Image (cartoon, rainbow, N blue to C red):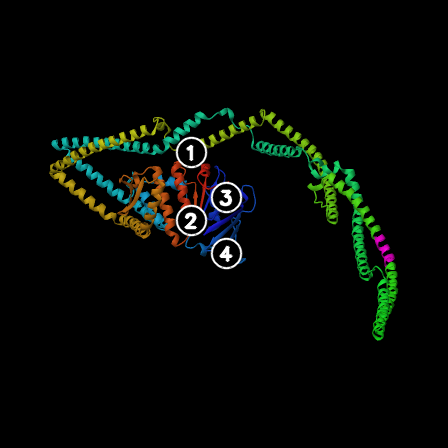
Amino acid sequence: MKITRIKIYGFGRWLNQEFKLNDDLQIFVGLNEAGKSTLVAFIVGMLFGFSNKRGHHQNTYEPLNGGVYGGELNLVIKGVNYLLTRKNRTSTVTSLYNTDLGIEIKNANEHLAQLLAPLTKESFQQIYGFSQLDLNEIIELDEQELKKRLQEIGAVGARDWRQLANTFDKKAQGMFAANSKTGKRPLNEKMKQYRRLVKELQVAKQNFPEYRQLLQEQQINEQKLGELEQAIKTQNTLQQELTNLQPLLGLYKEQQLLINSIDKSVAPKIADDLQQRVTELTFQRDNLIEEINRLKQEPPTANDDELLVFFKKHEQTLQRLEHELPNYQQMITEQKILEQQVQSLKQQLNKQQAVDVEQRPIEQQGKLSLPLLFLFLGLVISIVFIPIPWLSKGIGLVIILGSGGWYGLHIKHNLQRQSTKQKLDNTVLGQQPLAQKIVALEGEIGSIQLKISNVDQILTHLNLSKFTFIKQADWHENIVQLYEFFNLIHAKQAQWVTMEAAINYQQKHLQELEQQLENIVAQIKAIYLGLQVDDDEDYYWQLSQQTIYAEQQAKLKVLNQQLATSNSLLLEQYTDAHQLTGAIEESKAKINELNQKIKTIQDQITNLRVTLKSLANDASVEKLTQAVANSQADILQNLENYLANSLAAQWIDQTLLATSADRLPQIIKQAKLFFTELTLKRYTDIKLEANELQLITKNNELLKIEQLSKGTSEQLYVALRLAFVVVLNDVVKMPIIIDDAFVNFDDQRKQESYQLLKEISRNNQVIYVTADSRIKDVVDQRKITAL
């Protein structure tokens, strides 16, 4: 089982408080009276029910500040999430919800008892919960009681059986009490009679001179023996005290050093609420200063924007250019149209000129001379060949006829040529308007190009290459670029207008912040004046001194608590641990010397008793000796009932021992690992010999439980308790709740204890409450909740 959340409606000092717990190691740190033990009592009460009894020594944790008694626990049991609520100390209303299914469970108390079985409130506290009080009880127990307590660790419910054994023992004590002086109990009466007879026998024996002398020697020896035993007892007590002082000497020196170093002149004078107020004001002041400094940084201006700077420099030219931009765009469009018209007209003119070339006739020289020549030749031939009349007539006729035909054709051709020429003249007259149109259109184009060249000069002068791409070859694209250029300028101008408004608001806000800063600074100065400090540095120095003083006082309080039961007068006698160790060794040597003397005296007494016995031989001595024997028999007869009850108690002890023997070897094996770690490997083994625990040191020394120091006894108990929890995990797994159980451990062993808890928390949730704030230095902060 694991506890993931605690909510307290009202319980002792806690009111409407909620805690979220780690599922492995959860540490609560708080000073005394912070409510640590109250929190532990609340957890146990929520799991097993609140106490409904009231008495002088019974703390029922009624809410100090009113409110509903009770609270909530969120639990994870075998992978299922539950919400447990209890309200009211008497007539408690208990509810249990399965939050995974979102349902309320009927018969909440019975179902919860089944989930927690086989544990009861008492067995849970015996197994999974312990505190410094439990460790203190261990130190106060004698050897036999310590052995019995360790037996209880190995057997669940052993405490109840131990109470029954005590009942039988009390019945036996009702028949006989060794320390009773009244003699009213049956066996005490018999013992009184027996002592009387023994005394009479002793008187009878004293009648013998030698016997009397030997008896006197025996008394002297017994007196010496008593003195030696008392001396050993005194030395043992001193040795034990000195041994107990060893772990406390360092604390005592630290206490004295702290007392001498505390400067009482810096006693707290800055109240918590005033500290809170100064913290709030200085926080506000620093934030205001930071904000004011940020706002005071030089605000941006139009000069920061290269485009706006350029626009302001050439504003008139750019405005005129933007104004004329639609006209330029129209001119470019018209130019393209005119160029297309010129191209079309030129194509028409070229076609007409091609036709003119094809139809023009080739003029020749001497247009009528050739036909006339042939005619003249025909006449000559006719005259020459007159003697041959038929021949001359034929040739002449042919020539004449040919010349006539040619002449006729020439006349016809001239007529046709004259008609073609007339047509060509008409064509030339038709071509003249096209050429004129072309010239006119090209004149308009030239006028447009002149205007555009003026724009080119302006753009060249402005050098807009930083802001746009102007291409002289493509004015249509240039127009688009110029429109985008002017749109960008207008966007920048609009942005700057908005920015100017923001800057004006910023300046107004800056004035308001400066006024707030002035007010806060005045409040801080007023507080500082009341505290008699000059400035922040002086204030925080005073606060640091006050904190140091409070820490010293808290530390001194803890040291005083740890040294409350120590012998401070004895501690004052030793300056360091070496001197104390020397005193312990000296006491051990005295004890050895006394033991040797006791052995010598005991040997002498034994020899005297043998001699005295041989001298007791007269009739009166024999008679009294018989009476003593009869009295002894009578006593033995009356011991029957006494022994029955006494043996019953012993039988229970033996049964508990046998019961715990099943798990005890496992516990011892696990405890060995824990004990070795807690003692920094000073002890290496724990053995169970003849039902008795024996400890092995790293030097192979064999020690009994009663020989351990206070701190080591506590560490052994912690190791056994934690080992028992680990061994029981196969039966039931519950959170371990420890209430500041490591107070008497030194810093190094505390650190080892915390490391051990961290290891155990991998399987069992560990909830540890402590007043030791130094735990924050050795444990992950995420595992710690400050109370």
Q: Nearer the viewer, residue 209 or 99?
A: 99
Which mark is drawn over residue 762? 2
Which mark is drawn over residue 437? none
Mark 4 vs 2: CB contact within 8 A: no
Q: Residues within 10 Å of mark 1 (few under 14, many from 20)?
A: few
Q: Earlier in the sequence, mark 3 or mark 4?
A: 3
Which mark is drawn over residue 561? 1
Q: As shown in the figure, which amino acid type bears the numbered disc 3?
A: Tyr
Q: Earlier in the sequence, mark 3 or mark 1?
A: 3
Give the residue drawn at x 67%, y 33%.
Answer: 298
Residue 248 horizontal side relative to residue 214, left or right? right
The residue beneath circle 3 is 61
CA distance for labels 2 and 3: 32 Å
Q: Nearer the viewer, residue 479 or 535?
A: 479
Q: Secondary structure at mark 4?
A: helix
Give the magenta-colored segment's residue range. 427-437
Q: Nearer the viewer, residue 95 or 172?
A: 95
Q: As shown in the figure, which amino acid type bears the numbered disc 2?
A: Arg
Q: Secondary structure at mark 2?
A: loop
Mark 4 vs 1: CB contact within 8 A: no
CA distance for labels 3 and 4: 23 Å
Q: As shown in the figure, which amino acid type bears the numbered disc 1?
A: Gln
Q: As shown in the figure, which amino acid type bears the numbered disc 4?
A: Ala
Mark 3 vs 4: CB contact within 8 A: no
Picture quadrant where residue 774 is located:
top left
